[in-house]
Every structure is written in C-alpha cells, then in structure tokens.
Image: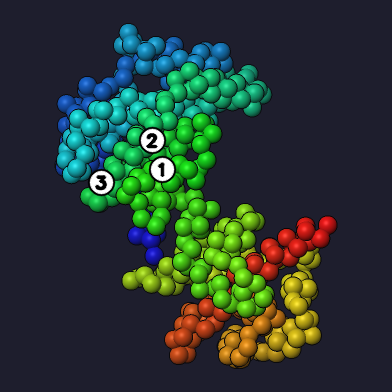
Amino acid sequence: MSLFEIELNDEFKIHSSNVFFNEKDLKNYYKLNKLNDGYDDNIQELITEYKLQIHQDLFVINGYRYEVNEINDIFLSNIYESNINSTEHTLYPEWLLFLISIKKDKVQFIHEKEFDNYLEYFKYIAEIRYKKYIKRTVKDYICFEEYKNLADIKTSLQNSLLEYLKKTEYETNELYEYLNFLYRFYQELKDNEKYKLMWNLEPYVEEVIVLLRDKNIPLKEIYEEVYKYMRGTYSVLHEIYIYKPLYIEESKPYFQSYLRKINELFNSNVNIEEFIAILTKNERNEDILFSYLELIKRFNANKMSEHTMGAMIKSIVLGVEEIIKDYKEEKKLLKCLKSLADDENLFKTYIIQEYEDYHSSDELLELLDNLISENNQSLEQYLAIYHASRNYLAHYNIDMNKFFWGEDGERRIISNTIDAVLIILFRIETMKQKSIEGK
C-alpha cells in the first residue's frame, strides 16, 4: 500500500496557482507547507533578495484588462528582462518555498549554493508555468467583447509560447542535469518528511520532462536516463509520475510465473519479453496490467486496505469485460467468452449459469472454488472462472476473507481470477495477430 494513499486538503498545492504571489499569499503557502517555526514568522530577510518587481503593462496581473496583442507580446518576451526597471508591483516566485526549506535547514544534503547553481532553471520553469497559467485563465484578463474569440486567443498564446521556448531552449545535457537535481531534492524532502513541499516540486519535474519531450526524446529514454547510475529495477521517475508501459516492462518478474501456464494452455513457447510485448500491444491493457501489479504488491504490504484491494480487483475484472466485448463486438459476455474457447461444448460444462446454479453470493463462491479445485485446468475452465468471478464482483459486496484468502488461506479464487484475466488478454491479442496474418 502506498504511503500516500491518504486524503489531504489540497490548499497547500501550487500546481494551478498564479506562480508569482504577493507577500500575503507567499506567507500563506509558507505556513501550509509547514515551513514555519512559529505562528507568524518574519521571513522578510529570506525573500527580499528574490522579489520580482513588475509593471502591469509588461506583466499580466490580477485586476487589469489587456488587449490580446499585449498578452501575446508578454508571452514573446522574457518577463524578467522586460521588467528590469519596473517598480510598480512586487511579487514573489513560488520556487522561493523550495529555497526557504534549504535556508531553514529543512533538508540535510542540499545547500543554498547548489540551489543557486540551478536558479536560472527555476526562474525559467516558473516563467513557463506562469505563461501557461495565464493562457488557461486568459478569460480573467481580456475584455468581455473578446470572449467569443476565446479558443482562437488560447491558440495564439500557445503559438507565442512555443516561439518563445524555441528561442530560449536549453541543451539536452543541461536539462538532464537539472532534472537529476530536482529528483535528488525530491528525495531529500521525502526523507525529511516534507511531503507537501515534495509534492509541490513535482510540477517542476513535469515541465522539464516536457522540455525534453519537445526535443523529440522518447519518454522511455528520459525515464531510463535520469539517475541511471543509481537506479534499481525501476526508473526513479516512476516515484513522481508512473509511465505505465515502461513500469510494466520493468515488472517482468511479476509476470514470469505465468509463462509455463500460458505455454501449456496454448502450446506455445513465448519468453517473458514476448509475453509482455503481446500483453502491452493494446494500450487499453495497460491500466489492467498496472492495476494487477499494484494489487499484487498490496498483498505483501504491512497494512493492507481491503477496500482499496477490492476496488482494484473489481476494476480489473470489469475492465477486461469491456475489452472482451469490444473485441467481439458483442454485448453479451457469455457469448463472447464462448467464442474465445477452443471447445464450446467443454466450456458449457464448466460454466456456472447466472442466478440459475446458485442462490446467494456464498453459494457462488463455493461453486467457483469447486471449479478451481478441479485438475487439468484448460482454457475453457479459465474462461468459466473469469465468468463466475465477474458475476460475483459485479453483483455482490466482496467478502474479502472468502474471495481473497479462502477458507484455508490459499488464495485460490483471487489467484485463479488473475490467471484468467491474463490468459484472456493473451488469448485476445494472439487471436488478433492470427487474424491479421490470415488476411
């Protein structure tokens, strides 16, 4: 179970904020991110050096209305250079929260001098985030008469932003160096239990990834590059944003145990790389495979949330149902499953008819357990196991002890349900491939 599967008041987040704050708002975020040592700390000496003084004609600011061409000009300009002689308004950048954490020794192994080495990057990302924020909320800054042109205005601003980014782009190696620093900073905040500030650092990581993607660098390559000399099985960036295709690929050990069963059922000889490639050929399978991995990991957690686990297995099984129906272009699940079988008559002997062969959820689970206990499991048997599990999960409240653990703690029902899910996904993808090859 993830440490962060908790609900929090999200007022501490800077993700969608105005990026540059007045002093009152900065102090509010300072407290919400638990940087204060007292109720009303005097932080003026920590922030004065980094204030940004701007003019309302050279910076889009709350309370003012602008012509569209004026906002476009601001998007094309460097907001720091254009406001260098301005004194009308004072604002403070959001990244000051990160610097304050260093100045106040809230992290151990990142020092102010090192932060200063990357200051230009923080300023650059803040400028990008500011312009994206203005584009999202441009309706608040233009005249009412322009509302009818809102979509065109946003397109124009996006083009101006892209033009500015093209003129000011950093080298690839510089962006990777900064991204490595952000990840290390992220870990320091985590290690020192500054979780809120850690989460607020994530938008900066995201923006750097976007800048690298704008250079046509594949996302997989970016994930494999960051902290590549210190990474383990998984890319470190999954801790911040999980990239499902790579995460599934890196989780091969969790799929290894299914190979023997798959190869026996289908008289095939696929290896683990081929198995993963087949399962992930359809992007729609990714959510199911990812949920499977998360579910398996929760079996070994110290504190399991049975509610979360129940929701996950229900999502997995019902998600597969949609894939089956879409593949067969048929609304009736039983008819779809029958067409996936090699032997329809054998399938009929295994199937537990809906509401006909049982009268309660306990009876259905007992019948399902008996079906699983039979020897010489076949494709048809797994299709029937899936059908029964689907009916149970779709129509009844989950008895976690019986469905997940079983009377003897052997986990037969949940294990065989997952087996059936992966077998069905494999079956569908290989049938698709045969159909293509036969054309």
Q: Is residue 19 visible?
A: no
Q: Sequence order check: which comes first, mark 1 or mark 3?
A: 3
Classify residue 327 by image quadrant: bottom right
User: Residue at the location (42% across, 69% down)?
Assistant: 298
Classify residue 390 by image quadrant: bottom right
Question: What is the CA distance from the residue labelled 1 to the residue labelled 3?
Answer: 20 Å
Question: What is the CA distance from the residue labelled 2 to the residue labelled 1?
Answer: 8 Å
The amino acid beneath tag 1 is Glu
Please name which of the two marks, 2 or 3, marks the residue nearer to the observer: 2
Q: Is residue 253 visible?
A: yes
Q: Is residue 404 above or below residue 212?
A: below
Question: What is the CA distance from the residue labelled 2 to the residue labelled 3?
Answer: 18 Å
Q: In what element is the residue under mark 1?
A: helix
Q: Determine whether label 2 and label 1 are within 8 Å by CB.
A: yes
User: Residue at the location (42% across, 26% down)?
Assistant: 171
User: Residue at the location (76% across, 78% down)?
Assistant: 342
Total marks drawn? 3
Q: Is residue 7 above or below residue 73?
A: below
